[in-house]
Image: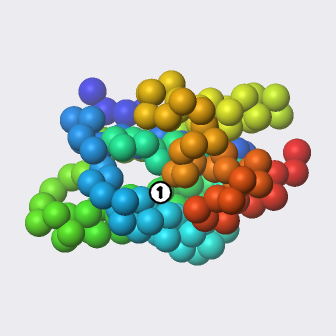
């Protein structure tokens, strides 16, 4: 059954999720996380996507951010996912799809939900028992948001 149309609203914040095909790992080595982060920086600048939170899990990704024009959400994620797929397939001698279907996105309407959603995203590694506490995981926005020597400085100012 095909997916219905995506709800896209100018100026809205979104919780975006995408998962590896058949729940496969999309990060085979530490260099893959770095590559994805470099691409995330490139595409957020290209499309003026305001990034408020993220978490790169071994087989899926969570991103929270804001768009200012309807067509930006699709362009941002399409460019990011396509660029990373090309890198991954070339690096690992693969062909074909890396991601399971199209990305999912949920509109974030209320300010309190926005903060709860960021906390949910950043707590993913602890819930999956990859680490004991979110501050131990370097591939999420937790360390940057809490000024704990992050691996990357990529977040935009979160002004509600």
Corner quadrant of residue 42: bottom right
In front: 83, or 109? 83
Location of residue 125 in the rendering, given as x and y in whole percent from the top left corner: 50, 35
| Residue matched to label 1 | 77
SS class, disc 1? helix
Task: State whether residue 4 appears in this view.
Answer: yes
Residue 51 x, y percent position in the rendering: 67, 56
Residue 114 in the image: state x and y as whole percent. 74, 35
Q: Residue furthest right?
A: 160
Foreground pick, 50 / 123: 123
* Viewer-side residue, 146 vs 24: 146
Return the residue nearer the eye: 15 or 60. Answer: 60
Residue at point 27%, 35% (across, down): 23
Q: How is the image coloured?
A: rainbow
User: For the image shown, how many numbered marks are present on the structure?
Assistant: 1
Residue 108 in sight: no
Q: Is residue 82 left or right of residue 105?
A: left
Q: Residue at x 76, y 48 (%)?
A: 146
Vertical placement of 91 versus 120: above or below?
Answer: below
What residue is shown at x 43% (from left), y 42% (from top)?
A: 57
Mark 1 residue crowding within 10 angstroms, few (<14) / some (14–19) / many (20+): many
Residue 68 percent coordinates (x, y): 72, 58
Q: Quadrant of the N terminus?
A: top left
Q: Quadrant of residue 160?
A: top right
The image quarter containing residue 14 is top right
Q: Is residue 112 left or right of residue 14?
A: right
| Residue drawn at (81%, 51%) of the image | 158
Relative height, residue 41 to residue 56 (above, below): below
């Amino acid at each position: 059954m095909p997916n219905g149309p995506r709800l896209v609203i100018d100026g809205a914040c979104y919780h975006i999720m995408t998962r590896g095909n058949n729940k496969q790992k999309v990060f085979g080595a530490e260099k893959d996380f770095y590559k994805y982060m470099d691409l995330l920086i490139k595409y957020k600048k290209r499309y003026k996507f305001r990034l408020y939170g993220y978490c790169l899990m071994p087989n899926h990704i969570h991103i929270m951010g804001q768009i200012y024009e309807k067509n930006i959400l699709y362009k941002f994620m399409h460019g990011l996912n396509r660029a990373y797929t090309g890198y991954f397939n070339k690096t690992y001698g693969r062909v074909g799809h890396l991601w399971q279907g199209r990305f999912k996105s949920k509109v974030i309407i209320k300010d309190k939900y926005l903060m709860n959603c960021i906390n949910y995203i950043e707590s993913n590694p602890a819930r999956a028992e990859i680490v004991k506490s979110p501050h131990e995981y370097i591939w999420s926005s937790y360390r940057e948001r809490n000024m704990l020597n992050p691996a990357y400085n990529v977040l935009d100012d979160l002004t509600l």
